[in-house]
Amino acid sequence: MLVAVERFTTGANAHNLRGLANAYVLACENDQPSIAERYRMRLLGELDRSVRGRAAAFRACMLHVA
């Protein structure tokens, strides 16, 4: 999950995703599992939203090419 944040995020959303990833790691390191789980779920939701947005943009681009 953290690799996905670093490799596949760009633009304005990257800052938000990196912040969530860092908060998740810190919660894990500080033995705060419930807080870590909250950040993990938020991070996964944001990653999913980001991927869906890119897929929609790609489909729209391909419609203009065809």
Image (cartoon, rainbow, N blue to C red):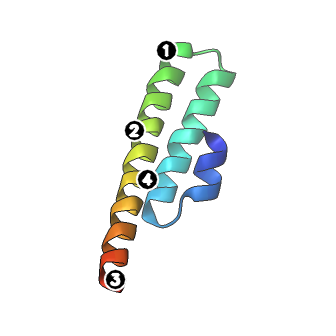
Label 2 residue SS:
helix
Marks 4, 2: nearer the viewer: 4
Q: Amino acid at mark 3?
A: Ala
- Going from N to C along the chain, the mark reached first, 4 or 3, is 4
Callout 1 touching callout 3 (CB < 8 Å): no
Which numbered disc covers residue 66?
Answer: 3
Within-10-Å neighbours for mark 4: few <14, some 14–19, many 20+: some
- Going from N to C along the chain, the mark reached first, 1 or 3, is 1
Q: Is residue 1 left or right of residue 35?
A: right
Label 1 residue SS:
helix
* Image location of residue 22, percent across then percent down: 60, 40
Q: Residue at x 39, y 60 (%)?
A: 55
Q: Is residue 61 left or right of residue 25?
A: left
Taking 40 as reference, is 37 above or below it? Answer: above
| Residue ID for mark 2 | 45
Q: Is residue 43 left or right of residue 26?
A: left
Q: Residue furthest front?
A: 66
